[in-house]
Structures are given as C-alpha cells and as structure tokens.
Amino acid sequence: MARSASVFVCSSCAHQEAKWHGQCPQCEEWNTLAEERAPTRAASRRPVGARSAASGPVVLRELASDSTPRLATGITELDRLLGGGIVPGSMVLLGGAPGIGKSTLITMALGLMAASGRSTLYVSGEESAAQIRLRAERLEAGAAPGALDVPVLAETDLDSVLAVIEGERPDVCVVDSVQTLACADLSGAAGTVGQVREVASRLIEVAKRTDTAIMLVGHVTKEGSLAGPRVLEHLVDCVLQFDGERERTYRTLRAIKNRFGATNDVGVFEMRDGGLVEVLDASERFVSEATRAPGSVVLAAMEGSRPLLVEVQALVSPSEMVPPRRLCSGVDRNRLALVLAVLARHAGVSTGSADVFVNVVGGVRVDEPGADLAIALAVASAASGTALSAPGAKPLCAFGEIGLTGELRSVAHHLRREQEAEKFGLTELITPQRVGTLREALKLPNIGSEAVSARNAA
Ligand code: TYD
Ligand code: MG
C-alpha cells in the first residue's frame, strides 16, 4: 500500500492527521493544521558529535572527549553568550522582531570570521545580494572588517541551498531567514509551521554531515514566539533572542537555550551608524541617564549571572477609560497587575481610576520577580508626584519581590546586586534585607499614603 508522503500537523498541539481539516480534531483550534513531510525511518537524526555509525549503547567514559575548537565570531558579547564561540556542526537560532538588527549582527559576525580566515556563506531569502552589499559597505566602514568578503547566495529554494552548502562546505553558514526558505515537496507556503520545521531539520542534517555551523535567523511572530509555536526551539542547539525597541539604540541579546554553554546571560549592544557596538558598561550608562524625576527609580536587576542597573519609569494619570489602561514595556503585564493590586490593598496607593504606564528605559527587558519593588516605588512616586531622591543626589536604587500579603521577599544574588549599586555610587538602597514590607518601603522616601494625604491636606 502506498503511504502518503506528507502529514498534517497541528501547530498548537502537534496532533497529526492524514488529511487536512479546518479544525484540529484534538485541540479544536481552527486553521492550525499545516502540511509536513511524513517522517521516514531513514531520516532519523544523529546528535552533534555522534560520528560513529554504531547504534549500540556506549559508556561515556570510553568516548574520546570531544574538544573541537569553537569558532569565535569576534564579537565578544556574542561569543560569551554562545559559551566561547560556535560549535562546528551545531545550529544556532537567532530570533528577534523585524528591524531589530539581526542581519546586521550576523553580517558583522560573518565578516569578522571571514577576516580571520574562516570560510563563510550568507544565504539570504529576504534581501538581494545588492541590498546585502549596501549593508556590508556600511559595516566595513565601521566595526566589521571583512563584511564585503562574505560570499552571498540569494535563494529561497531549500534544495538549491542544501546543494550549495554541500558543495562549498563552509565553516559557518547563515540562513536569513528560516521563514523565507521553502521545500518544493511540501505544498504549504514558506513560513508555515510545516515548512519551517522541514527547512530546519534538513539544514541540521546537512550541518552535521558537513560539520558546518549554521546560524538560522528567525522572525518573532506577533505572539512573541520564535518561528511558529516553539517548533524550532527544541530542534536547534542554541536559541538567541535579540530584543530592544526599534526607535531606541539599545539592544539586548539573550541566550534562551544553549546546549554548549550557560543560559540566561545577556549582552548589551548599541546600534550605531557603522553597526552594532558592544556596551560593556551598561549599568553606568543607564544610571547616568536616569532622570531622578517623580516616577523614576533605579532597579538592580540580574541578567543571568550579571547584575545590571536599569531605570524603571512610571506615569500615573487620571483616566476616563473603564477599565483604565495598564501599559508596560520591559516588564511583565501580570507582574504589574499584581504590584498595583498589592499597592492598593496593602500600601494605600490606589490607581483604580488612573492610567498606569511603566517602562524600563533603554528597551531592556527585566523578566524577574526582583523587579516588583522598583515597579511599586516608581508607581507610588508617580502617583504622589514626589521624586524618590533629593535634588542633586544619586538616584534611589531598589530590588525585591513583593508577596501577596504586602511583604518584601528576598531574591537571588542580593549581595551582587548591592555591590553593583555601590559600585556606581548608589548608596540609597531599598531591599528586602533592609525593609520588611511594602508599606515601610514607601515610608522611606516618604511617598506612602500618609505622606500623600498630609501633603494634600496642607
Ligand atoms: P537589520 O539588520 O536589517 O534588521 P533585521 O535583520 O533584524 O530586520 O537592521 C535594522 C536597522 O538597523 C535598520 O533600520 C538600519 C539600522 N542600521 C543602523 O542603524 N546602523 C547600521 O550600521 C546598519 C547596518 C543598520
Ligand atoms: Mg534582516
């Protein structure tokens, strides 16, 4: 009996069907079935470093330890995130919103690698070779010598791309972006879940065979996930996420997953005219730019293993909207909701009839509970119209988690956060180690509800 060569896979629950349906029979989502090539036995994948054809179990100690030298990209922050450079034959996924600078970063990395004698290949399904040349000219004048020496292949057909990689066998190949390549055997358009998964898995296979390190660029979808519902994240060895706001110059690069290094680390870059420049003194920059106005506070955050001082700003303004707006960038919406609820219930700072905006300056994202106290202080300060630090003084610095009963809870690495604050002269600190509850914390800079009512009465 002939088996059909493709299956239809639900992009939300991964349920498989032989035929296309408008609604997934399993999770009942609409329009989520996408065509994929049916898995064949021969297509089973071998992990990186598995070079022997034997399929029996092996004792780890008896395996020759694999000390393949890494390919340094020449961009210090990128190499640090990758754990010392790219592992030959591995696959790195670089995700980020359109226009954030993904192509710029990889063009710089390829240029620097080409300049240091590595063979490189830039596969672009998005831009023509002429457009890439324009960017490379800009970069070569700036931070990335060698950007014009990178061979470029403008192609969207997967099989042609694979043939070129097999033929050229470069040390590093960039595919910009995974959503623009398509396999002709599948009926779905480029960028559908089935296509993206097929493209990535066939590229991985070739990467392993030719020992070529592949960097895949992936656009982040509206929901913020990388190239479909996390379809790629478990296929690749390393996932890097490039964040920031397009209008601002700061960009953060973060390792979300790394089979060959630490995760949760972050590198900070600045987009300049000649390309991306690493910001090694990010804390100092953000502290010196802090406004110290009402609604501003400095947060001692942890970005992976590194402390980072960032400014958190809040604006509280009367609203006619029901319910009023809660907008934030750089912090989690749900944590903001929790902080506002605790402020109202346990600290007497009510924002029920006001719009609340919270922003982490510089386009940095802080996704940790340690940001709670800084958000609360910024909101309370904005609501009362009182600055947290005296005029001319250094800004106030805070960190700590807020519990549902209004208590302050300690967070990881409090000593390293304190040291970072002291290093930049921030001696006014509010932390769970010094203060027990949110209500007491608000009394210190004198922005608690009592202070506000006394001021209003006066
Ligand atoms: P790009 O790398 O094309 O973004 P992505 O690949 O993530 O979509 O670059 C985005 C922006 O960066 C673009 O608007 C122009 C700007 N840019 C600079 O500011 N300086 C530079 O040197 C370069 C090359 C780009
Ligand atoms: Mg691009």
Image: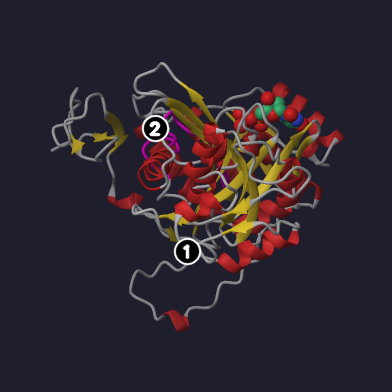
Measuring from the top left, give residue 402's x and y in whole percent.
43, 53
Measuring from the top left, give residue 132's x and y in whole percent.
71, 27
Q: Label 2 belongs to which residue?
A: 195
Region in magenta? 214-232
Left/right of residue 244 with respect to residue 334 in the rendered view:
right
The foreground one among 301 and 112 is 301
For the question of whether residue 190 can be seen, the reply is no
Q: Nearer the viewer, mark 2 or mark 1?
A: 1
Measuring from the top left, give residue 308's x and y in whole percent.
64, 54
State the residue lying farthest toward the top.
Answer: 320
| Magenta span main SS | loop
The foreground one among 361 and 34 is 361
Q: Quadrant of residue 94?
A: top right
Residue at the image point whose x is 63% and y is 53% from the top? 397
Left/right of residue 206 with respect to residue 429 in the rendered view:
left
Tell me the quarter of the image containing the N terminus. top left
Q: Amino acid at mark 2?
A: Gln
Q: Label 1 belongs to which residue?
A: 410
Q: Which SS class for mark 2? A: helix
Residue at the image point whose x is 40% and y is 50% from the top? 234
Measuring from the top left, give residue 221's x and y in whole percent.
44, 30
Q: Amino acid at mark 1?
A: Ser
The foreground one among 333 and 76 is 333
